[in-house]
Image (cartoon, rainbow, N blue to C red):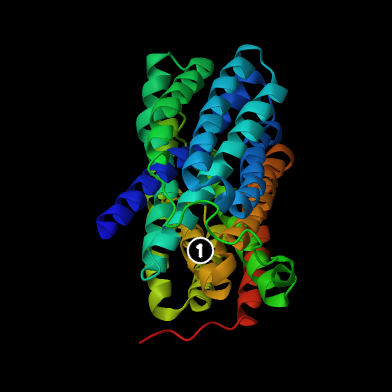
Amino acid sequence: MTIQKRWVIAIMGSFAHLSIGTVYAWSFFQNPISQSYGWSNSMTAWAFSLAIFVLGVTAAWGGKNLNCFGPRKMAVTGSFLYAFGYIISYFAFKTQSLALLYLGFGIIGGMGLGLVYVTPVATVSAWFPDKQGLVTGMVVMGFGLGAFVMSKLIAPQFMQLFNNDLAKTFLSIGILLLIILPFFSSFLEPKEKPGSIDKKQESVIPYIKRIDYILIWFMFLFNIIAGMIFLSFQSPLLQDLLRERGITDKIIIENRGATLIAVSAIFNGLGRFFWGAVSDKIGRISTFRILFLLQIIIFSILVFSKDPIIFFVGVCIILLCYGGGFGVLPSLIKEKYAGLMASIYGITLIAWGFGGIIGPQIIAFMKDNYPDNAATLSYYIALALLSLGLINSLFLKQKAVNQ
């Protein structure tokens, strides 16, 4: 019964992640929002950046307090907050209020994201001490696949139904999330009852001040920034390349942008599962080194290529590696800080928050100020950061892999 129960928790946790992973389809809305309301790329992208930043900060708080409140209560609360973020965005679009969009989608929605994200990972990790990389990779794979569901299924249907009315589309998405997300979250159950563990938990401060943890934190951050450049603007960047090739039909280029979001979302999701499983075999740090090397190669190619097909493939590989970072991180933290996994994992997700600001704002700034070379300049920055991430990984020792 316990074996069956833990798999139900893992599957429902994956569906909860799938639901909140819809936030990764932001680039589907980036151009329509910017063009409809006359906001710059940077101004519009701040809604997404805020959501990811608040996600990271809230996840840190959630990880620390998970045992106190319990995963079910925390995740259901987060479910309502994320859904309300979309509903509030309806009023933001109706009143053309950028500040209200930041409050709704960015802050309130971001808080919901953080609470829902951290709970399934920490909970499933406790239930599966024997399959850390595999099962936590499966759960976070759901988050990566959320963009596919949003960009190819949910958003296009609502946009067509409401004749491209962004306000009604966001309202409908919010109502849909209000129905399904609390249901998935309600299945999350702790292995031990909330409060059953000694509340005088060891302080995490001495651990997060150590050089090895700081190296891990920045290693994760650099991987995030590289992926966020594409997560926030992959569709607009592909559309720019298609226009340079003489394709001007708006419907065609928007459909191809949506297809890229959907396909890259599959790679993002599979990367979490695949690299998590790989890390069980070759070790967590070795896996991160491969992720950095592969991305450095891809960004180097993209610097010199303007081919839409190469760009399409490159984005998919970058997001495969981006997702890989999320697939490996939980088991890496569990391996190094077993007794403090939830708290330290949550703190590490703050790096995701900062990456959510830095990555999208790099490309948004370049598009607003250097539109002709925005992509290339962003790739150079990504190359520099990925190189630093690789260097960080070389100073970290990994636990011996069981043969």
Q: Where's residue 381, x and y in %? A: 68, 59
Q: Where's residue 237, x and y in %? A: 54, 42
- Residue at point 74% right, 71% down? 206
- In this orientation, does residue 263 appear? no
- Residue at point 39% right, 72% down? 278
Q: Quadrant location of the N terminus?
A: bottom left
- In this orientation, does residue 298 appear? yes
200 on left or right of 184: right
Q: How many marks?
A: 1
Q: Image height check: is 239 above or below 95?
A: below
Q: Nearer the viewer, residue 251 or 264?
A: 264
Q: Is mark 1 on a helix, strand or loop?
A: helix
Q: Nearer the viewer, residue 387 or 178?
A: 178
- Residue at point 30% right, 50% down? 8
Q: Image height check: is 328 above or below 403?
A: above
Q: Image height check: is 218 above or below 313?
A: below
Q: Disc 1 marks which residue?
A: 330
Q: In the picture, residue 186 is in which quadrant? A: top left
Q: Residues within 10 Å of mark 1 (few under 14, many from 20)?
A: many
Q: Which of 345 and 233 is in front in this view?
A: 345
151 on left or right of 6: right
Q: What residue type is labelled 1?
A: Pro
153 on left or right of 300: left
- Residue at point 54% right, 21% down? 87
Q: Quadrant location of the C terminus?
A: bottom left
Q: Where's residue 108, x and y in %? A: 63, 32
Q: Where's residue 265, x and y in %? A: 42, 47
